Image (cartoon, rainbow, N blue to C red):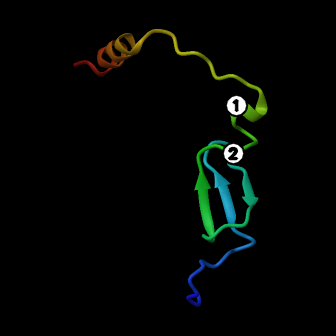
Amino acid sequence: MKADCHPTMHKDAKTTCTTCGATMAIPSTVKEQTVETCSSCHPVYTGKQQQERKGGRIERFRKRAEKKGT
């Protein structure tokens, strides 16, 4: 077997959530990392549902186009 083929494991790796700003210490192969949603702000874990968007794609596109003025 090859020596030193496994990556180094950082036990105190800093993980930051970009949605809620929470920081956690999770073992990882990288020293610092960011995630979009974590367990403290994800709707599945919190039980909160996101608001439904009203209108379809075409209506939303037309609204944006009107605001832009083109």
Numbered tag placed on residue 43 in the rendering: 1
Residue 55 position (above or below residue 17):
above
Q: Are marks 1 and 2 in contact (CB under 8 Å)?
A: no
**Mark 2 burial class by Cα count in 10 Å: few <14, some 14-19, many 20+:** many
**Residue hosting label 2:** 38
Instruction: Choose top left, top right, bottom left or bottom right for residue 38.
Output: top right
Whole-percent x, y for residue 40 in the image:
76, 41
Asked whether 63 or 53 is in front, the reply is 53
Numbered tag placed on residue 69 in the rendering: none
Q: Secondary structure at mark 2?
A: loop
Q: Secondary structure at mark 1?
A: helix
Instruction: Choose top left, top right, bottom left or bottom right for residue 6.
Output: bottom right
Residue 23 position (above or below residue 48):
below
Query: Which quarter of the rendered picture does the N terminus lie within?
Result: bottom right
Whole-percent x, y for residue 3 in the image:
58, 90
Q: Residue furthest left?
A: 70
Query: Which quarter of the rendered picture does the C terminus lie within?
Result: top left
Whole-percent x, y for residue 69 in the image:
26, 18
Residue drawn where x is 34% and y is 17% of the image = 61
On screen, residue 40 versus residue 6, left or right, reads right
Residue drawn where x is 72% and y is 50% of the image = 22
